[in-house]
Image (cartoon, rainbow, N blue to C red):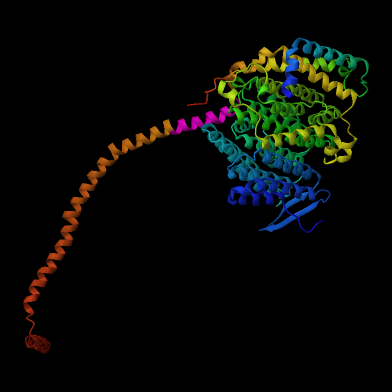
Amino acid sequence: MIVRFIDFFRDRLGTTIRACLALLALLVLWDALFVSKEHAHTFMERIPGFWAVFGFVACVLIIVVSKWYGHLGIMTREDYYDD
Amino acid sequence: MTDLWIHPSLILLVGAVILPMLPKALRKPFLVAVPVLAFADVLSMQGNFGVHGVTRFLDWTLTFGRVDALSMVFAYIMTLMCVIGTIYGLHVEEPAQHSAAWTYVAGSLGVIFCGDYLVLFLFWEIMAFSSVFLVWFRGRKESLASGYRYLLVHTAGGLLLLAGLVLRYQATGGDISFGPIGVASPQLYTWLILAGFILNAAVPPLHAWLPDAYGEATVTGSVFMCAFTTKTAVYALARGFAGMEILVPLGVCMALYGVVYAVLENDSRRLLAYHIISQVGYMVAGVGIGTELAINGACAHAFAHILYKGLLFMGCGAVLHMTGKSKFTELGGLYKRMPRTFVYTLIGGLSISAFPLFSGFVSKAMIVAAGFEVHNYWAAFLLTLASAGTFLHTGLKVPYFIWFGKNNCSEETWKRASDPPMNMQVGMILASILCIFIGCYTPYLYKMLPFPQVAQAYEPYTAYHLSETLQILLFTALGFFLLLKKLTPEPKISLDLDWFYRMGGRAFYWFARKPVQTADDAVSEAWDRQGVVPLMKTARYWSWFDWHAIDGVVDGIARTVREYGEALRTFQSGRLQLNIIAMLALVALALALLAAA
C-alpha cells in the first residue's frame, strides 16, 4: 500500500513538483493576506513571506557554510584513525 | 503520602539481576513485565508529591525519592521509553544486554528522584558504567575502543562533578542537598558541578563522546542511550542551574554545531547523534533563559525528544539490523523493501523538525517563544535557523538518502533489506503514535510540566505560528531539493574534538614507547656496561676477603681451640681413681703454696 502510494507520485514526478510549488505559493499568499501579525516581536516578521525567505536562506546558508567548513580539512578519509 | 514508596530504579535493578537467571521461556514475558511495572510505579506517584526514601548514612541524610512536578515529567517519559525500548529489543537473546540497559535506566531514574548530591553522584556513575556495555556489546573492534573512550570521558566528567561536590560541601558547611545552586553568584564549585553536568549534556567542547559512542553502540543500545544520558543532564541543569545565562549562548552554539556536522555526516546513526547535540541545545538554552515558560519548554522538549529521537534511532537501527549498513553511501532506494520503517522514521523526522501536528511543534516552540519573550532575539532567531537545519537533515536527508535517492545498495544489502521483526515494529508504532498524539492533543503533555498553568495558557496552534513554521519548513525543503547535488553523501568521516583525545592518547602512547622506553633501555644498557662490571669486581674482592680474611680468622680460632683441646685430651684417661689422685695432688699443692706464703 505504502509502496503503491509512493510510486503513484514518482510516476507523475513533474506534476507532483508543480503541485508542491503551487502549494508554496499559496502558503505565502495566505501568510500575506490572512495571517494576523499583531503578535510579531520584530518589524521584520511583519513582512509578508518573511519566514519563507528566512527558511530558504537558512537552508542554503547551512549547506554552503557546512560544506565549506568540511572541506577545510575537517572531512577526511574513513580510515583516518586506523593504525 | 502513602506509606509504601518503591523506587522505580529498584524494580529495574532487581529485574536486571533476575533476568539472566530465568529459563529462556520466561524471559520474554519478564522483559515486558519489568519496565511496565516500573512505569506503573511512576504512574502511582502522580499527584502524590513529597519526599520519600530518606535514609541516614554515616553523618548524612540521604534522599532517594523527591517526587515533584519536575522529577515526575522526566521519570514518566523515561520509564515509558524503557518500555518501548525493551519491546523494540525483545528479539535480542543476550540477557546481559537487557540487564545493562535496565541498569542504565535505573541510574537515570535514580538521578531524577534524588534529593542530594551524594545519591546523585552514585547514580550518575551507575549510568556511565552500565551504558558503556551497550557500546561494547556491538562487539566490533571500533566499538571496544569507542566504549573505552566513552568511559574515560565520563569518568573525567564524574570527577569534575565530585570535585565540585566536595568543594561545595566544604564551602557550605556540610550541605549536600541538590537544588538551585545559586546561579547569581557562581563559585568555583558551581563551575565544576556545571562542567560535570554539561559534559553529560554533550555541550561543546565536551560533546565528542556522543556521536563517537552512539554511532558505535548496538542497535537497541543506541535507542536507550539517545534517551537517557543527555536528558538526565538536562534535568539536572533545570533543577540546579535554571537562569544561568551562559547556558543560552552555549545552547545556541550546540543547536548550530550539531546541524553543521549533520550536513557532513555519512553514517545515518552518527547524523542522528549529532542532531541530539542540536536538540539538547534548545533545552540547554531553555534552561539558560530560565523563565517559567522556558523551563516548561525545556522539559516538554526533553519529553518529546526522548520519543522522537528514540523513534529515529529505532528506524535507522532497523535498517542497520536488517541490512548491516548504516552509511548513506551504502544504502538508498529502499522504499520498496522497507516501506513501513520509512513511514515510522518519517514520523520521527517530522516530529523532530517541529512540523505542525507532530510533537516537536508543541515543545520546541515554547523555548523559542520564551526567547522572544525575554527579548533575546539573536538566540531566538538562531534557534529558528537551527530548526531549518533540523528539518533539512532529519526530516529530509535521512529519509531521502536511505529510502530514495541513488541506490547504492550492494546486491546482498538489497536482498537482506525488509521490514524488521514484529517486536521492533511495535516499538516504532508505539513511539509514532505518541509523537502524533502529543502534537495533536497538547494538554496531555502540558499538564505534566513543572508550571502547568503557564503551559496551559500557552497556545502553539495560532495562525501566525502555523504560517511561520510551515514557511520555514517548506522553503527549507525547496532549498534541499535545489541543492540536492551538494548534499550527496561522501564516504568520509569528519574530524571533531575527539581528535584531541584520540590523538592525545596516541601521543601518550608514543611518549611511552619512544622517549620513556628509549630512556629505559639506555639506563639498562648503561647498567649492564657500567654498573655490572664494577659490581662483579667488588664481589670478587669481597669473596677473596671473605675467604682469606674472615675465614682465616674464624678458621684460625677454630684450629687453635682444636689444638688446645687435643692437648687437654691427654690429661683425661677416663679412670676415676686417677682423676681423684690428680685432684688431691692439686689441692695438696695449692695448700702447700698457701702455707708457704
Depth order, front residue of B394/B20: B20
The magenta-colored residue range is B495-512
- Say which quarter of the image contains residue B71: top right
Q: Residue at x 58, y 40 (%)?
A: B133
The image shows residue B70 at horizontal and vertical percentages of 79, 43
In the depicted structure, whether residue B59 falls above or below residue B541: below
- Left or right: where B49 falls relative to B168: right
Screen quadrant of the N terminus of chain B: bottom right
Depth order, front residue of B234/B14: B14
Screen quadrant of the C terminus of chain B: bottom left
The image shows residue B24 at horizontal and vertical percentages of 59, 48
Q: Main secondary structure of the magenta part?
A: helix
- Say which quarter of the image contains residue B72: top right
The image shows residue A49 at horizontal and vertical percentages of 86, 15
- Left or right: where B565 falls relative to B537: left
Depth order, front residue of B295/B144: B144
Q: Residue at x 62, y 40 (%)?
A: B131
In the depicted structure, whether residue B196 falls above or below residue B252: below
**Residue B48 in sight:** yes
**Residue B182 in sight:** no
- Say which quarter of the image contains residue B420: top right
The image shows residue B410 at horizontal and vertical percentages of 57, 20
- Left or right: where A23 falls relative to A66: right
Is B566 within the magenta?
Answer: no
